[in-house]
Image (spheres, coloured by chain):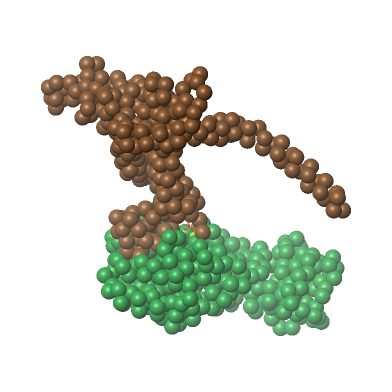
Chain colours: A brown, B green
Amino acid sequence: MALLFRKKRSRELVFIWALLLPALAVYLFYRVIPLVWNVVLSFSFWSPGKPAKFAGLYHYEEMLFYDDAFWVALKNTAVFMLGTPIAIVLAMALALLVDQNIRGRSLYRTLIFLPYPMMIVAVGIVWRWLYNDSVGLINYVLRSLGIIDQPIPFLESYDFAMASVMVAAIWQIVGFFMIIILTGLQNIPAHLYEAAVIDGARAHHRFWRITLPLLRPSIFLCVILGVIASFTSFDLIYTMTGGGPGLATELLITYIYKSSFTLSKFDYAAAVTVVMFLLFLALALIANRLAGGDAGKVDIAD
Amino acid sequence: MATVEFRKLVKRYGTHQVVHGIDLAINDGEFLVLVGPSGCGKSTSLRMLAGLEDISGGEILIGDKVVNEVEPRNRDIAMVFQDYALYPHMSVYENMAFSLHYRDTPKQEIRTRVMEAAEILGLQDLLDRRPKQLSGGQRQRVAMGRAIVRKPQVFLFDEPLSNLDAKLRGSMRLEIKKLHRKLGVTTVYVTHDQIEAMTLADRVVVMNSGNIDQVGTPEDVYHSPQTIFVAGFIGSPTMNLLPAKRNGSATIVVGEKSDFHVQLPAKSASNTDAFVFGIRPEDIAIASGDPEDGRVHVDGVVDVVEALGPDTLVFADVGGHQVTARVRPDVKPDIGQPVRLSLDVSRAHFFESESGKVVS
Ligand SMILES: Nc1ncnc2c1ncn2[C@@H]1O[C@H](COP(=O)(O)OP(=O)(O)OP(=O)(O)O)[C@@H](O)[C@H]1O
Ligand SMILES: [Mg+2]
């Protein structure tokens, strides 16, 4: 009996591992090995075709104490991240709006969601055209309305480039956030609002004391996704400004790209990547902790 | 505490009318139960009283004041919902204190009132819990606690017990009854469960597709149903309802094949010929010997016998109609065998089949 059990059990185990293996292999080759290799690289001197040498904390010291560009990119990433709360507030307003019984609400929903699945490179190109100082729509409208005399080269200006890129990023993600928040909203039972109405809570009380607390999981899912996006928005920045003018829109991710593929400092880029990864991990953990460990949970049924 | 009155109350959804101008006066401190089948407009009427639905026509008065245009929060009512509608992110204490925050109640007073309500309902040990951590019966109690801390003029209940199992429903029913006796607040209670209606109500309102068929004490609606609908709706197992025709001036013939004659009530001025003859299962026994005064014997065939314990239900086929009799538990007729039933026609009900109204 015991032998049979063991045999059956081992057969099951083989089966389970056989099913897991392909996925694990992909995960190993595309995630774990590069990550480990990246960490190793960050502690080495290495350039393509040369043997690696142990470097200790050399790259980290360089980055933290001597490289102003790194700090600019870090600051820019933080600024870029501020787009997330803005996008969430906008998404919340839009979600509350399309959650009403207004005519054509499914049309609005679709229109607002539309930018999200669009290829980001295409989004970048469209916005580059919109911002263009000679043929761009925005400048044309502003000048036609007499708001400005001179065209503004949004993406080439130190003052406007970051804000302009953020507007595009927010525009791109707000529809997705809206869908998340809308799902959360529609999971709040109507009876709760009716009970609150009878209890005497006015519309704004109901929003602060019922809607917002019950949306917390949805909102924190947006926060985490927004943080991820601000660490990984390479394509948008690269197509719109390439990090310029100067370092005005340089984010950590574009800085890593430039360090490795433009300047061939793969080892140094690896160190920046490790720092970015740790920052990202910390933020995601904090956000999930604040959400009570259930970011993204939509069912509040008890 | 207050009286409540409906005057020609109408509800329309678009062009579809679901409540057809009902009139109802509820006394101060009364426990009134709205009962009726699914979709008859009970909840809709209650929700209009609560202010959760707009009133399409007519008026609602609470304490002599027309409240059609009054916001729900100013109607001084409290409502208990079927799914309790507890705020899932708040503790039991916060749930009960919620409404007091919006009524400028001082903190100390809030505490006193919540504690008072918690004590009445036995919730003292649960005040820090979230609704998720409570059983169905406890949630139900919290929902009631939330209603009573307000000390409102009127309590509204919309099928508050239908999410509970049968046993718990029985004990909660008792608690609601006690609570009403203690607080004496005017209460409007919606249910489709006639046992709840019969046990809780001072008066029962039987609704039928957007109209009120009868208003009366539980005894009234049980013993003197005014319409065929009320006769068939109240009572379990349901009243036997058999077609009948006029035969002569004061008698009617019941059934088509296994006919029997009965006297119409003396004062009957009805000039229609088609009737419905109604008799409750408990007014039918198994016959032995010759019919006594006021009883009629009919022959049938036993279909099914259900022994319930305190008594036994016999379902018999009488001339193609099913007739139910509630008999003593020691009587065990054989299935498929002929049976002679003895009907106490002095307790029978007669209705005009066209209007559905009782003949009296
Ligand atoms: N929002 C609505 N729009 C259109 N029709 C509705 C709406 N709400 C209810 N109705 C209709 O009004 C009628 C009465 O509904 P109501 O909810 O009052 O029934 P009820 O007596 O409470 O039934 P139940 O016992 O099933 O709760 C039903 O026919 C229902 O279909
Ligand atoms: Mg209902």
Would you identify the image quadrant in which residue B263 lies?
Answer: bottom right
Image point (40%, 62%), residue name: A195
Q: Is residue B260 left or right of residue B358?
A: right
Q: Is residue A4 left or right of residue A113?
A: right
The vertical placement of B39 against A277, above or below, is: below
- Measuring from the top left, give residue B79's x and y in whole percent: 41, 67
Residue B337 showing in the rendered view:
yes
Q: Is residue A275 left or right of residue B201?
A: left
Image point (43%, 58%), residue name: A191
Residue B231 showing in the rendered view:
no
- Measuring from the top left, give residue A236's x and y in whole percent: 37, 26
Image point (35%, 73%), residue name: B150
Q: Nearer the viewer, residue A260 or B9?
A: A260
Would you identify the image quadrant in which residue A62 lies?
Answer: top left
Q: Nearer the viewer, residue A126 or A200?
A: A126
The vertical placement of A200 against A215, above or below, is: below
Image point (68%, 73%), residue name: B281
